[in-house]
Amino acid sequence: MDKITDLKKIVINTLDINKAIDIVSIDLKDKSSMADYMIIASGTSSRHIQALSEQVLEKFKDNGINECKIEGKESNEWKLVDGIDLIVHIFHPEKRKFYELEKMWSELIPKEKIII
């Protein structure tokens, strides 16, 4: 297996162990050039979301991804942890339902529309 696939498993396991809800992995390789995978999960409270994002960031750094960062630090309802080839979104359940990222990225997107 390659490094990004192994890291994806580590991140999913970390989210699961720390009680993230509804963890979903989306393969973006043929849909976007921004990343290989997107993981989406929910937290139960603003503190839980913050803690999950910090734990994911730590896993990225432990695995040699030093350019990673957390977006949405000021938000209580969502965080995005940018691990370059692996992006992790952590939402409050209501905000996740509003954005519907799983639906948007699970649909087949024509190649001419994937330039970001």
Image (spheres, rainbow, N blue to C red):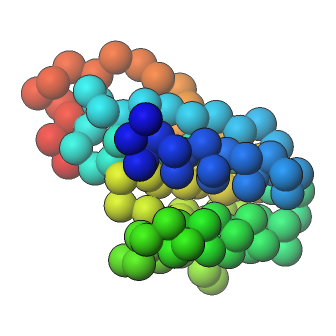
Is 109 left, or right, of 89 in this rendering?
A: left
- Which image quarter is the N terminus in? top left
Q: Is residue 98 visible?
A: no
Image coordinates for residue 103, horizontal then vertical, percent: 53, 26
**Residue 3 image point, x, y percent:** 41, 49
Depth check: give the residue in front, 9 or 86: 9
Q: Nearer the viewer, residue 61 or 93?
A: 61
- The answer to whether residue 67 is above or below residue 85 is below
Location of residue 104 with respect to 80 vertically, above or below: above
Q: Taking 78 as reference, is 25 left or right?
A: left
Q: Is residue 47 left or right of residue 88?
A: right
Residue that appears at 62% across and 74% down: 58
- x%, y% of residue 43? 81, 56
Instruction: Work out whether 55 lies above or below 30.
Output: below
| Outermost residue toward the left in this view | 112
Q: Nearer the viewer, residue 6 or 76?
A: 6
Image coords of residue 46 (percent x, y)? 82, 70
> Which quadrant holds residue 2?
top left
Q: Residue at x 74, y 73 (%)?
A: 50
Q: What residue is shown at x 41% (from left), y 70% (from top)?
A: 65
